[in-house]
Every structure is written in C-alpha cells, then in structure tokens.
Image (cartoon, grey):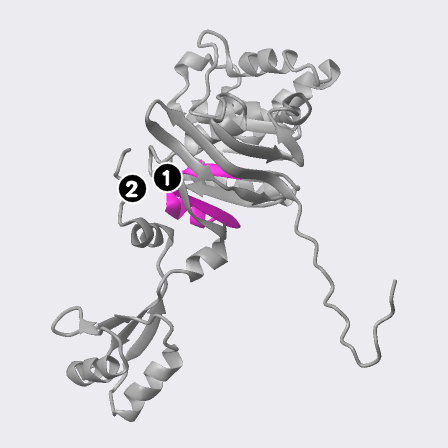
Amino acid sequence: MQPFAAGAEAPEPITPAPPLALRTSGLTRRFGDQVAVDAVDLIVPRGAIYGFLGPNGSGKTTTIRVLLGLISADAGEVEMLGHPMPRASTRVLPRVGALIEGPAFHPYITGAQNLRRLDVSDATANPATSAERITTALARVGLTAAAGKKYRNYSLGMKQRLGLAAALLQPRDLLILDEPTNGLDPQGTREVRKLIRDLASDGTTVLVSSHLLSEIEQVATHVGMMAGGKLVRQGTLQDVLADGAPTIRVDTPDLETAIAVMQQMGLEAAALGPDGPVTARLGSMAVEDVANALVHADVRLHSLNVDRPDLEELFVSITGEGFDVLR
C-alpha cells in the first residue's frame, strides 16, 4: 500500500451502511392489467419501527404478502434479514412474526387452545416450554383473563390481540403487522403502541402497516408512504416530516402591515379572519428573518409560531389525495 504524500489529505473514512432487516428493489406485482405494487424499493434498518403508510388500497398489504411469500412478485428482489427471498424462506421465516389481514383461528376452541395448536405445528418450538410461551404471549397482549374463552365469542379487538399473541409465541428478529390496531378501543391502541416500543427496545425490527398516520407518528422511527402502488416517500420520521413546508402564524393587531411586510419578502401571506392570524408558508425563508422584518416595521407581535405539517397533511400535499380514497 502506498503511503500518503507529505501534505496530502487523508481520505475520509468510509462509514459502513447500517444493516438492514428488509430491503426490496423494484418490487412489482400485477393483477391482470392493474399494477398493485409498482417498483417499490423499501429500506428497513434493523431495530427500526417502520411505519408503512397509505390509504386502504394503496398497495401496502399486497407488498407485505409478497414479502412473506404468500403471493409471488412479477419483478424485483426481496432481501430479508440479510438473505434473498423466497430462496431462503425456510431459514428466515421462523425468525419473522406476522399479523396479516386480520387473524384466522378456529372459532369453537379457546384462545389458549388456538395458540397451542399453532405452537405444536411449529417445528422450531420446544414442546417442554409451550405452556410458558403461550402464557407469556397472552399476557403481553392483555388476554390472560380471556384465555379460556372460545374464539367465536371474542370481540374484533380481542381477535386482533390474539393474532398479535400468535406472532409473539417465539422470539422474532422481524415483526410485520398489518393494521394491528384494527377494532381496538383507545386503551387497546395505546397498549399496542407500548408493545411495539417494548419489542423494538428488545432489538426486534417492527414493520407496521397502517392507514392511521396519527397513530404511527407517535411510535415510528422510520416511515414509507404508499400511494397508487408507488412508494412516494421514505426515510426517518424526522427527515420525512422536515420535507413538509412549515407555516408561520402571526397574531397581531396590525394585520395589513404584517401582510404587506411578509408579501414584500416574497411570502404569500393572508389573514385567516378579520382578526387574524396572518399565515404564510415559509419555504426556505428563515423565521428569524421574518420576525426581524416585522419588528422593524413596528408590527406589534402578540405571538409568532411555526407549524410543521403532520404525516397526513404531508401525504395530502405530496399526492393531492386524502385517506378516504380507495383504489
């Protein structure tokens, strides 16, 4: 290896890319002439809570079904826990837990008995510790008291909880959950959020598919937004939210002066009502510059705030569509 010449700058050290729990490249799935998943490139780091977001019909569940080998892809590649799929499915899938499109259980036996049937069918499970695993899984999802109740008598929320318990019977490196809070009351939803955080803190990567962006915003570290089968935005939650244009809101009795000053700075300012406030999208404008200009123009400021859009507002700004749109 040649030494560096005197005075030459040493090359910057190369930072290795973080290991990925899940990666897809050009993932595509068609149903006849309809492209349900259109060249999707997912990047899910290990240890992340990845919110897979979009309205019903946007391609989220189809993507997940392809990831788990439930249906085949028409094009593209999938790598899960460092291995190509579906070629390594027998090696990888025992390390993956999933709740897809609502759980399916035998209606005439109890919740605990349903889990026992699943546990017995798992070739990797130790029969000697089956009862302990089932008890622990039921406790983690708050179903201990209903363990002896027949599944047909479970509410929708209880059925979702049992599906989560089934996914947690074994330790998992990756957990894939499709609408896990479906049918849950607010308390149950909070408990699922806590469970997801606890799993991630233990080292499990969690991919959560949901159309409830406000819920995911409270728990996710990374997000990917789907619309019309395409992945329209992806990254850390902080970076994705930073892409949204912030809005400045000024409370002042000097509405006309404030609007004039802000318009002179190139902002499309307007009053929301006869008494304000005055609002405008900041774009790349620094809020400090706006505040300084208003003060120098003798605008009396009662308050000045900067609001960033939440995930749903950002989604609408990207796609022009709300979450009541079905495709």
- Image side of residue 275 versus residue 225, left or right: left
- Which mark, residue 211? 1
Question: Which residue is rendered at x = 43% and y = 58% of the image?
Answer: 241
User: Which label belongs to residue 11?
Assistant: none
Q: Residues within 10 Å of mark 2 (few under 14, many from 20)?
A: some
Instruction: Identify which amino acid the numbered label 2 is placed on.
Output: Phe
Is 147 located above or below residue 196 in the figure? above
Residue 73, magenta (yes or no): no
Tag 1: residue type?
A: His
**In terms of depth relative to the viewer, which is nearer, 20 or 276?**
20
Side of 128 relative to 164 (left or right):
right
Q: Name the residue under label 2.
A: 323
Left or right of residue 71: residue 268: left
Q: Which of marks 2 and 1 is nearer the N terminus?
A: 1
Q: Is mark 2 on a helix, strand or loop?
A: loop
Q: Is residue 5 above or below residue 52?
A: below
Where is 302 relative to 105, above or below?
below
Crowd around label 1: few <14 · some 14–19 · many ≥20 (10 Å): many
Quarter of the N terminus within the rendering: bottom right
Verify CB contact (< 8 Å) between mark 2 and mark 1. Answer: yes
Residue nearest the viewer, comparing 291 with 120: 291
What is the x, y in percent for residue 35? 36, 31
Residue 206 at x, y percent in the picture: 56, 39
The picture quadrant where one finds residue 251 is bottom left
Residue range corresponding to the magenta coloring? 207-227
Q: Residue at x 47, y 10 (%)?
A: 106
- Counting from the top left corner in percent of width and height, residue 186 is at 38, 39
